[in-house]
Image (cartoon, helix red, strand yellow):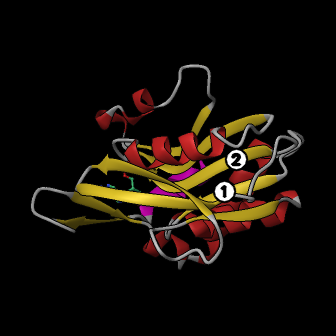
Amino acid sequence: MELEKVKSVIRDVYDFPKKGIVFKDLTTAFKDPEAMHIIGESLKQRYQNLGVTKVVGIESRGFIGASVLAYELNAGFVPVRKPGKLPADTLKKSYSKEYGTDTIEIHRDAIDENDVVVLHDDLLATGGTMAAAYELVKSMNPKKIYIDFIVELEFLEGRKAFPADVEVNSLIKY
Ligand code: AMP
């Protein structure tokens, strides 16, 4: 299966960014032309024909898959960024994650009630980052929100961080 190819080129980095964490390094998948193509095609196949208008990427590793998906769907790309990076008026949300706490921001005019949105990040760990991004986007009242990851660490049960009625997808599970 093609996704096995992607899995085979994801690198485990031990004790990064701190002791006890096994970091799933997707840069080794993104640099592999075949894996990069499979990721793009798999994302496109899942979301085509759903009327998606915006793909929201979470800084910074989420920007990669989100940009590819936005291009493939003829949708727009919207960044969710760390504090102080977005130049115009923003909405903010703080959250806790597998290692530490953080705040994210989105431009206040990035999404409207006519949008069908895919929220994308490279990896689901505890779900704290994406749950915060979901809250931000939800507050802008789009028609529909999908949540999407390339990798899901199922043992951390991050899906529990999202409302039960939201569709959550991941290509590769550990
Ligand atoms: P979380 O909020 O716990 O779901 O953390 C998800 C965010 O942190 C994503 O943006 C990931 O890129 C990053 N992350 C957390 N844990 C890991 C891990 N074990 N390997 C790779 N990235 C991780």
- The secondary structure type at the circle numbered 1 is strand
**Residue farthest top in this picture:** 164
Task: Name the N-terminal-most of marks 2 and 1.
Answer: 1
**Which residue is depicted at the point 70% across and 68% down?**
67
Give the residue number, with chain letter if any, for mark 2: 118
The reply to whether the C-beta atoms of the residues labelled 2 and 1 are less than 8 Å apart is: yes
**Horizontal arrangement in the rendering, residue 29 relative to residue 118 (left or right):** left
Residue that mark 1 sits on: 56
Q: Position of residue 97 (x, y in %)?
A: 30, 50
User: In what quadrant of the picture does the C terminus appear?
Assistant: top left
The range drawn in magenta is 1-8
Q: Is residue 94 left or right of residue 68?
A: left
Amino acid bearing label 1: Val
Q: Is residue 101 shown in magenta?
A: no
Displayed quadrant of residue 36 = bottom right
Report the front residue among 119 and 173: 119
Residue 6 lies in the magenta stretch: yes
Classify mark 2: helix, strand or loop: strand
Question: What residue is rendered at 30% in x and 48% in y?
Answer: 96
In the rendered structure, the answer to whether residue 122 lies left or right of residue 74 reads left
Chief secondary structure of the magenta span? helix
The quadrant where ligand 1 appears is bottom left
Residue 66: % across, % down = 66, 62
Could you say which quadrant of the image residue 32 lies in?
Answer: bottom right
- Residue 34's spot in the image, x, y percent? 63, 71
Give amino acid for label 2: Val
Q: Residue at x 38, y 36 (%)?
A: 158
Classify mark 2 as within 8 Å of ligand 1 or not, answering yes or no.
no
